[in-house]
Amino acid sequence: MTDEVNALAQLKRLLVVEELDTDLYRGISSPQLQGRVFGGQVIAQALAAASGSVGPERVAHSLHAYFLRAGNNARPIIYRVIRDFDGGSFANRRVVALQDGKPILNLAASFHRQEEGLSHTARMPAVPGPDHAMPITRILSELRAELPASLAALLKAFDMRAGQPDSQGNGPLGMPSQHSWFRLDPVLGPELARITLAYASDFAFVSTALLPHGIQWFSPAIQGASLDHAIWFHDDPPLGEWLLYAMESPWSGKARGFCRGSVYDQSGRLIASMAQEGLMRHRPPT
């Protein structure tokens, strides 16, 4: 089994939560791995749990999540779903992710019955294509970044590649920005497309706020963590095609950084929008 096929199998197993009882789900643990759980995993599993209580005629169109505590890879995560609302077109769910009886994440998600309506979309940024981008794993190796082994292995499932970042905000919006290309493999299946996109959306996102300061996210001089995360799904992400993740940071300060992101398909269609604030506590060596 190749590394990529193995990574895809691991990712699919990770994103399918187990139903324990009505509105109660469990995400798998990885006791062989050390350290805290990747935030994108908890968001994706919480969305999967919320989706389990909503009929297939409605799809997730938005979610808002707050990270409360660091999760532990060695223990499973329990997801409790609260059914706040079921209307004719919309349904709303709250999810509490628990470890050792304590909340590690709160998530609210809204689901919408598909409708047609007036439409417009932002223009896709003019950036070099995926053939001109460098594999994320190679970049991290050159930076000697200590990425958790669990996350490094799963990144192979996305064939993620990063373009040249703009740390000085020389682009049209004048904000520090970066972009990456990635693919959602058809093996994952359409029912996991939005959940998988939620997983991928957390990777390197908040690091955009560090670009103008010349410090890497994995530097010992930074105490960093995601604080909250929001996603608006505008369309189903296509499987097997390259997706552009464009990220920008309009502000940082007060030991926090704020970032916005947009995901486009190669035709320029806007698939999803994201926002995140993260802890960026600077602790230079004394």
Image (spheres, rainbow, N blue to C red):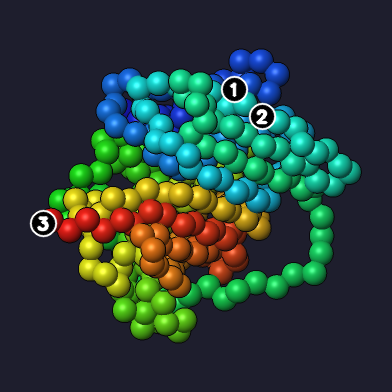
Up the image or down, 243 lies above or below 167; here it is above
User: Residue at 26% across / 35% down in the picture?
Assistant: 149
Q: Mark 1 or mark 2, which has the lower sequence index?
A: 1
Q: Is residue 83 above or below residue 125?
A: above
Question: Would you call the spot at circle 1 few (<14 residues within 10 Å), some (14-19), or many (20 or more)?
Answer: many
Q: Residues under labels 2 and 3: Cα distance?
A: 46 Å
Disc marking residue 141: none
Q: Earlier in the sequence, mark 2 or mark 3?
A: 2
Left of 244 or right of it: where is 47? right
Task: Provide residue 196's location: percent of width, then percent of height.
Answer: 51, 42
**Alpha-carbon span between mark 1 and mark 3:** 46 Å
Kindly report which numbered mark, 1 or 3, lies closer to the viewer in this rendering: 3
Residue that mark 1 sits on = 25
* Residue 142: % across, % down: 15, 55
Which one is nearer the viewer's eye here, 135 or 228?
A: 228
Label 3: few (<14), some (14–19) or many (≥20) C-alpha neighbours in 10 Å: few
Circle 2 residue:
81
3D distance between C-alphas at marks 1 and 2: 8 Å
The residue tagged with tag 3: helix, strand or loop?
A: loop
Amino acid type shown at disc 3? Thr
